[in-house]
Amino acid sequence: MFGNMTLGIKIVTVVERPGSIRSAQGPKTMAECGFSECPHLDLILLPGGIGCIEQLGNEGTLEFLKDRSVSAEVTMFVCSGAAILAKAGLLDGRRATSNKRSFSLATSQSDRANGLQRHVG
């Protein structure tokens, strides 16, 4: 989907250290940027999935998101990615939602994540 965007948008996959990364389901992708050499990001899209649980304890990831979300126009998440943003304090006082399977994981990451709303459906 993102590859079909023709408005001069450059998509960058960022992880702590660049290289091949595998999803919990098995497919691999190539992350070309690590945190230290990542360019300015206008938009941040944090994916969800089972790998989010491991990242909740990764201070490097949490600090990267805190630092970069300040200058990004939009920081967004999919599904359980809400838990990482909540843990980083980036949902404090903000309205957000997550699906029913990830809701308690997200709300348990911060006592100030009261802006999280359960998604019905």
Image: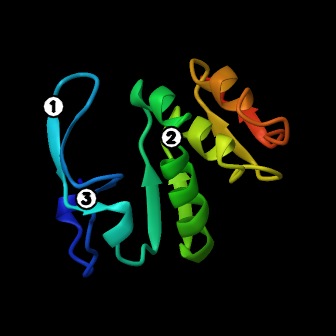
Mark 1 — residue? 27
Using the image as rendered, state which of residue 59 and residue 46 is in the foreground: 59
Q: Given the image, on which type of amino acid does mark 1 rest? A: Pro
Q: Disc 1 to disc 3, how far (Cα)?
A: 17 Å
Percent coordinates x, y for residue 13 in the rendering: 28, 57
Q: Residue at x 46, y 29 (%)?
A: 54
Q: Secondary structure at mark 2?
A: loop
Q: Is residue 28 left or right of residue 112?
A: left
Q: Is residue 90 left or right of residue 55?
A: right
Using the image as rendered, state which of residue 81 and residue 4 is in the foreground: 81
User: Quarter of the image holding residue 12?
Assistant: bottom left
Categorize mark 1 by other alpha carbons within 10 Å: few (<14), some (14-19), many (20+): few
Q: How is the image coloured?
A: rainbow
Q: Residue at x 44, y 54 (%)?
A: 45
Mark 2 — residue? 58
Please tell me whether mark 2 or mark 3 is closer to you in this view: 2
Circles 1 and 3 in contact, beta carbons < 8 Å = no
Categorize mark 3 by other alpha carbons within 10 Å: few (<14), some (14-19), many (20+): few
Q: Where 14 sits versus 106, above or below?
A: below
Mark 3 — residue? 2
Please tell me whether mark 1 or mark 3 is closer to you in this view: 1
Percent coordinates x, y for residue 69 in the rendering: 58, 66
